[in-house]
Structure formats: C-alpha cells, structure tokens
Image (spheres, grey):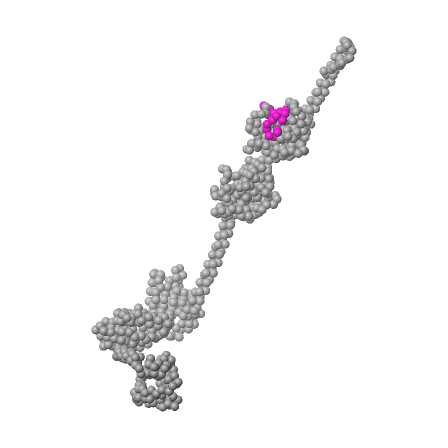
Amino acid sequence: MLNFHSVAPEYFTDEHRYIALEVADQLAIGMHKAALVDELARYAQRMEILHAIDLGLIQGGSIKTLIASTLQNLQRVIPCERIGLGLIDQSRQEIVIYTSNFDYPSELLEGTRIPIPPNWMRMFDAEGARIVNNLHVADEPPFKQLAKEGFQSHLQVLLRGQAASIGVLGFSSRTLDFFTLEHQDVAVEVGSQFAVALHQMHLSEALGRYVRRLEILHDIDRGLLQGGPIQHVIEGALKNIRTLIPCQRATVGVFDSNLQEGLLFAVDLTGETALIQGTRVPIRPSTFEGLDSRHMKIIDDIRPLSSVHPEAKKLADEGLVSGLQVLLLEQDRPIGLLGLLADTPGFFTADYQEIALEISRQLALGVHQKQLADELARSYAELEQRVMARTAELQATNDRLTAILNNSRDGILLVDRDLTIVQSNPAFDQLLLDASPQLPGENLLNYLDTAAVARVRAGVEKAITDQRSTQMEVSVKRPDGVNVDVVLGIGSIPGDGLVAAVHDITERKRVEADLAESDARYRLLAENIEDIIMTFSMDRRITYFSPSCQKLLGYLPEEVVGRTHSEFIHVDDYPQVVDRTRDAVVAGKNAYTSSFRLRHKAGHYIWYEVHTRIMRDPETGKVFNFVSVLRDITQRKQAEDALRESESRYRLLAENATDLVIRQDLDGKYLYVSPSSRMVVGYAPEEMVGRNGLDDIHPDDRSNLLQIVSIISEQHPRCSIDVPLSAQGWPLHLAGIVRASHLLS
C-alpha cells in the first residue's frame, strides 16, 4: 500500500491521484518482481541444499558430515538458532541425538537419549510436521529443557523410512511464533532427503558391519582351524568386536566344570581396570538371572546395582555404566560368558545385540576347543605321569626281581613251552658249574636225567592246563658227569612261557640218609633202655613212644602215639609244661628240662624228670619236632619231701629250744641261727647270719676248732665240743654237739 499525507485540507487533486495510481502500479510491479526474486532465491537455496544432499549421497561420503554441512546451509533458509537431527531407536522407544549445529552449553548433547512420550507420533500432521509456537506452555521434558535454555518456539519434522519413522529433524528459535508454513515446507522437503540419506547410511553401515562381522567370524574360524593359541584367537576377536560395537571393554570369561568359579580368560579395553586377565570371580546365582530367550542380558545402567553387587560397584567406579552379557553355550551347557561394557547408559542397541549374539556363537566354539585342549593336556599330563609312575614301578619290580634272581639260592629259569632256556640266574649257572654262556637257547631237558624227561613233560602240560605250579624230584646232569638231586618246580606265566625253579636237595638227601641210619640206631637204643623216649609235634601230639613205656607206665606204644600229651600229664602240672615249652621255643633254645607227673595206666601218677631237645630246620630255623627223655624221679621226690618234712620239724625244734642251734658252712659262715641267740650270746639271729663264725671264737682256740671241724667232717659226723665264744664282748664257754651233714652243709 502506497500512502500520501498532507497538513492542508483538500490538498490532493485528481492529478495527484492519477500520479499516485501510476506510481503505485510501478511500485507493485517492482515489489512483485522483488518478491519473485526473493522466492526464487530461497527456492534456489532450497535446491542447492537438496542438490548438495543428493550429490553427497551419490559421491558416497560420510553421512554425518553431509548432514552437518546441510544443517549449516539450512540455517540460511530457516534462520533459527539451533537445528538438530535425532535417530529413533524403535526397540527402546527412544530418540538419540545424532548431530546438531550449536556451540553453547546444553544438556541435549550428541548421544543423549530422550524417551519418546506416549502418543507422540499422533502430534504430527499428515506431512509429518509439527510447530510449537510457545515452548513455555509445552509439557514434554525436551521442550522444557529447551525453554530452560532460552528457546521460545520449535519446529519438528519426522524422517520417514520405508516402514517406520527413522528420525526427527528439529529447529529451535529464541523468538515466539517464529516458524512459518514456508519454513515447514522447506523442513519437510529437506527432511525427506535426510530420510533417504539416513536410510542409505543405515544400509551402508549395516553392510559394513555385516562385512566386518563376517571377517571377524572368518578370523575366529581360521584361528580355530589353524590350531593356534585359543587365547590369541579370542583376544583378536574381542579387538574386532570393539570396532563394530564401540564400547569401552570386551571380556570373555570361562566357567569351571561345576559352575562355581569363572576365570577372566581374555580382556580388551580402553583405560585401566582391577579385573585383569587371569582374575577368578565366583559365579553367583544372579549370573544366570535376567537372561532372555537368547541367553542374553542387557543392563542399561549398572549404577543402581552398586549397592547390591560388589562387582557392579567396581565397574561403576571405573566409569562403566551399561553392559551386555551373552552366555557361551556348548550343547545348552554354559561354558563361558561374553561381556561388553560401555560408559554410556543404554548403549547397546538392537544391532549391537545381534552382532554380539552371532559372534558369541563362534566364541563358544573357541572356548569349547580351549576346554577340550586343556582337558587333553591334563589327560596327557596325567597319562604321562601314570606312565612314568608305572615305568618306575615296573623298573622297581624288575630291579627287585633281578635282585631276587641274582641272590636266590635256588636256580631260576625262564623257559619257553618247549622248555628252551631263555634266561637263567647265577644260582642255576653255578649248579651247572658256571655254564651260563651256553644256556640260553639250550633245552632244559638236555640237562635232566633221561628217566625224568617224561615226568617233566607231563608236569609242564599240567602246569599249563591247570595254571598251577607242579613239583617233582629229578636229577640234573652236570658237565663233569655228576648228577645233582633237585626239586624242579614248573609254573605257567600267562602269555609268557614258563618259570622253572631248581632247588638243590643233595644235602637234604644226605641228611635224610644219615637221619634214617641214625633213626635206626636211635630206635635200637630207645627200645632197650629203661628211660622213656618220646617225640611230639608242635601241636603237642605224640609221634613216638619207646617200648619201655609199657614197663614204666603200663601203656603199649600204640595206645599213646597220636594222642596229645595233655591227656597224660597231671592237670596241675600241665600249664607249667606248656609255658616251659613255649618260652624255650621263643627264646631260640635247643633244649630245656622240666619235671611233671604222668598218669600210669592203673590211674596213679609217677614223677618224671624230662629232658627235651628242640628239633629245628637247619636252613629256616623253624621247629618241626621235639624229642624228650623221661626218667622216673618218684623216689627222689619222696626223699625231698621227707627231707623238707624233717627240716620243718628241725626248724620247729630249733626255734623253740632254749639251747643255741647254729648251722654253718665249711668256711664257718652262719647259715642259720636259732632265736635263742638273743638270750645265749646277746645277738639277734639276723645279726649273725652271714657272718663268719670264726670271728666269734677266741683267737687262741680257733686253730683247735678248725682241726676238730675237719676231723668231724671227714670221720665223725657227730661229736661233743666245748667252744669259747665272745658274747657282746664277754667271754663265754658253750658246750654243744656238732653234726656234719652233706645235705645241709
């Protein structure tokens, strides 16, 4: 509109009106032309922006760089203070700020995740646009944050893909009601190109990740097939995973067989950590809680778990916020865990999850191969240890057998089933006068007496058939023509021929012959002496009783032989007989003497003194028999009993008599002094017993006394004597009777 104003009334004429109309027409034409120029310029700018996007897509450069430069150019067309692009994470219903063109402090930075409000999509028009003219009245948290940062109005445009919205383009202005429909049209048009760019970016990134994923899987497969160190393969895989999933840490843990403890097997990380490779961590029940059907667990924020799990606190202290865990399985059996950690909350997207899941399957093969290799190594080490132990045991056994063979007094041979000699020991070589160099390869039958060959062959067949050793007496022919009597034992070695043992019995044969001759003489003697000769075995069974037993005990020999001597010994005497026999055997004695009563056939008992000889094997020392000579000592026992009775009466008389009774030996030592000594000589009996009685005789009379004692002992067993004694220092004359006794001496 063109306006003219005057201070004079009715100033404007028709001419003025005509000129104004003409000028207005020209101005309208000029203004229309200027508007067309401005619109054309804006259109040209829009086309330049769209062309730049198309050119960037065609040239295949960085999508993020293309979007950033486009946002700068777009700001000339829509001159607001802030333009940003966010990507929509459909799986988590969040918007992730991808890029923006502002350089002032803000909480809405790149990577920030903003939850999508309910019914948010319904707030856009058909073209996918939305204008908020006053942010101060908006309820959505992001708008409140923008208002807090000084923005007044906002324009949003959805970036629509083929199936769903993939992002949002946002414009923010510090002016109320800033955004026009033209701004909206430009934003929608640019947004559609951005959608194409993002779709291409997703395709390109997905293709790149897929190719890289295949490369990682191929590297793992190649490492497993080439048989390299499993740890290097897994460590390389973790480095590669972090190129696809740019997290701060990747680990693989291996479980023990009983799921009690996990070993941190491989680690790839940025920064430092206390959980280094080789760390052992207890496996808690929570390790297997919260896993989804893919055996995967996503932890968007570790920090709230710090108060419950010490490991979570350690991770949070190291700046790690979110985590992803995938069980490594071998036929549904947990064998390990792939763990990824990032310093951003909610970092692990669906794409990252898919990548981790696929690579985890290959890592499970690697861990399983490691476990198999470890088990094989352990088995090999155990087998090697057992082989070494068994070898040492066999060597020790061989050494013992060699020692036994070399030190055995019997000849020992290893022979084939046809009795060909394979090996012989020194004892057999010595038996054949050291003919050992010719023995291996010779047949044992060549060294045996011809008459024994058939018996030996039969014994070999029996040993093989019965798998038991057999023995026989044969003669071995020595090279010097002398025959040696031996006991040949043959036993079968399962699957390894025969063993033959040769025991020289030449000496035994000689002893047996001498014994037979001695036995004949012994029987002749035993059958003609008055004493009884008896032999009995270790079980106390009588094996021989001489014929004199009939005269002395009333038994025929055959009535006694075969019975135990306990049947004839008095029941009161039997325990000491058993003790004496046992003690003599244990002490290694060759003979002992005892006395006991034997029952006569008529029923009464007779005392016998028994001298027993213990018969032992000269080689082993083992007792095999007893020989006893029994002599009747009944009269001696009766005399001893009578003497004991006489001495008892004598002692009773002496101890009650007022006269002094003394018994001395030939040297004069007091053997007995009667109690009357206290009254007669003033000494107690115990003061005198043991002293020499000559000390109590007056010195002038000692020689006479000794002469008298000598005469008495030799000629007169009894005489009277007058003896001067000293009683407590006083001289005393005693008259008495002296009797010599060889029994009492």
Q: Quadrant of residue 198?
A: top right
Residue found at x 39% / y 63%: 498
The one of 480 and 616 positioned closer to us in this rendering: 616
| Image position of 495 (left or right of 63) | left
Q: Is residue 455 visible?
A: yes
Q: Quadrant of residue 158?
A: top right
Residue found at x 67% / y 33%: 104
> Which residue reaches farthest left?
602
**How many numbered marks have been drawn onto this rendered protein structure?**
0
Q: Is residue 430 magenta?
A: no
Q: Quadrant of residue 37?
A: top right
The one of 520 and 227 positioned closer to us in this rendering: 520
Task: Name the quarter where the C terminus is drawn.
Answer: bottom left
626, above or below 314, in the image: below
Q: Is residue 128 magenta?
A: yes
The boundaries of the magenta stretch are 126-144
Residue found at x 35% / y 61%: 467
Residue found at x 55% / y 41%: 306
Q: Position of residue 8 (x, y in %)?
A: 78, 11
| Image position of 86 (left or right of 688) | right
The one of 647 and 148 positioned closer to us in this rendering: 647
97, above or below 479, in the image: above
Q: Position of residue 291 (x, y in %)?
A: 50, 39
Q: Position of residue 267 (x, y in %)?
A: 57, 45
Task: Name the quarter where the N terminus is drawn.
Answer: top right
Q: Is residue 196 visible?
A: no
Q: Position of residue 118 (x, y in %)?
A: 55, 28
| Image position of 52 (left or right of 663) | right
